[in-house]
Amino acid sequence: MSTVSSPARGQWTSKTGFVLAAAGSAIGLGNIWRFPYVVYENGGGAFLIPYFIAIATAALPILILEYALGHKYQTGAPFAFRGIRKAWESLGWFQVLVSFVIATYYTVILGWCLSYIVFSFGQQWGDDTAAFFIGEYLGTSEGGDPSGFWDVGGLRLGVLLPVVVAWGLIFWILKRGVSRGIELASKVLMPALIVMLVIIVVRAVTLDGATTGLNVLFTPDFGALSDPAVWIAAYGQVFFSMSIAFSIMIAYSSYLPRKTDLTNSGAIVGLSNAGFEFLAAIGVFAVLGFLAAAQGAEVTEVAGNGGIGLAFIAFPQIINTLPGLNAVFGVLFFGTLFFAGLTSAVSILECVIAAVREKFGASRTTAVSVVVGAAAIASLLYVTRGGLFYLDTVDYFFNNFGLVISGLLEVILIAWIARQLGPLRDHVNATSYLRVGTGWTISLAAITPVLLLVMTLYNVWNELREPYEGYPRSGLLALGWLLVLAAVVLAFVASRIRDRGPAWLAAGNSSPNAEME
């Protein structure tokens, strides 16, 4: 009897296309502006030890697990989890909703990158880059003081226009589908991204003071390894940077042909992500060393904090002091941020689109229009005078609680409740040259859930001990705890809506190939 599966599903035309798309999803803004600072703050070169242990015991095992889920069930996260346990479809919807919320503010940052590409010509941000970014460009309430949290204000036209352009590009890529849109864009953007980063790094390491910056970054502090917070930071970094528990990799792997080497693809994506992070770290701290030398300061003084401040405040300062071709370096840096973010934003929304199509039997055009339209409207909140506060709050809660909790529930369901690690391991090994074995099973059944539980408790303790960034508790409650809770409720509701899901699920089969197995 012939195989029954979801109709009209897209498919990658080549393994290279899938690997580039998956790597594009993993390689995002955080690789450039978060990882270097995490290394610097957590023991420098010594951080590499927990970092690679975290990749081996958590990131790669979960990545391969999600490849197996999507590839076996040929669906996005909600129906993949429903194929394991019907009641757990809601977990898939929670992951989808987390991705949707993240996409609403992630694309706004892409708009900032587009603006700063233009600002690079003539260094339009001036000498006081912080005042320009927070006050003049974003128009943040009270100059960024948390007391202005609820001063929403009106829309910032200078921010809105590039955000609209970013949404337009995302819509165009997604509407074209898996092979003609996402895969084609990845084949163009990823090589361009690597070339741009290499140019930045080569220029950075040739600057005066670059060696000082690299020494600060990589000089090992082995005493830091006795601090549990360093290990939590390592697992947190690989967890967030590999696009796991977003439901992205489940959706992406569902577009793979039946005979695909899953473990090899996972290893390539994981190592590519790590390599990009280290290359970015070298470039970032080399130029920070140059800035410190130019200002007669310590690298620790100019490094500031990782994240938005590093990208839109510290780097414009660096560009101001570069000898010659400042505009070119600015365009390269913010262009690199934009390309990295664009491939990630597309993947974040694709998992939502896949879930909507499977649940409601919608055409791709309809699903893309509804999902992108709704996300674009929601993103207007971050284009207001209080937008920076709201973006920071939502990002903190959905990364530190939403993603970690969804990952914890995922491994508990599969390893402890449904006990599906064996069948999924057999599925992976049936088509893969690199076979997974006992180590993979132990990592997912014991190491990963324990560490994710510790991370969750650690994050809750930190939040209860001191409100995030000094924001008012009303803001943290409304845009943090209640928004995460709303995602939980909506996920439960979505799982109970009558659907037009894949025929093999309606028939009660355990996989799309149950009749052949």
Image (cartoon, helix red, strand yellow):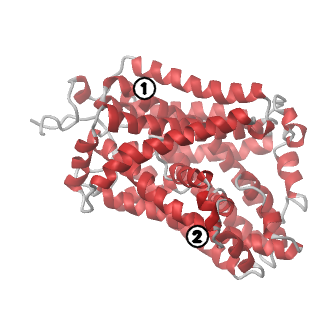
For residue 90, which numbered disc appears in the image? 1
- Front residue (pair 207, 13): 207
The crowd level at tag 1 (other Cα within 10 Å; few <14, some 14-19, many 20+) is many
Amino acid carrying label 1: it is: Ser
What residue is shown at x 28% (from left), y 29% (from top)? 502
Residue 337 at x, y percent in the picture: 64, 58
Examine the rendered structure and indicate whether residue 161 appears above or below residue 492. below
Query: What SS does tag 1 mark?
Result: helix
Residue 489 at x, y percent in the picture: 52, 20
What residue is shown at x 44% (from left), y 34% (from top)? 409
Query: What SS does tag 2 mark?
Result: helix
Q: Disc 1 or 2, which lies upstream in sequence?
A: 1
Q: Split into 4 quadrants, where in the image is the C terminus?
A: top left
Can residue 20 be seen? no
Q: Split into 4 quadrants, where in the image is the N terminus?
A: top left
Q: Which residue is mark 2?
A: 279
Residue 482 at x, y percent in the picture: 64, 24
Examine the rendered structure and indicate whether residue 222 appears above or below residue 236. below
User: Taking 383 as reference, is 489 left or right?
Assistant: left
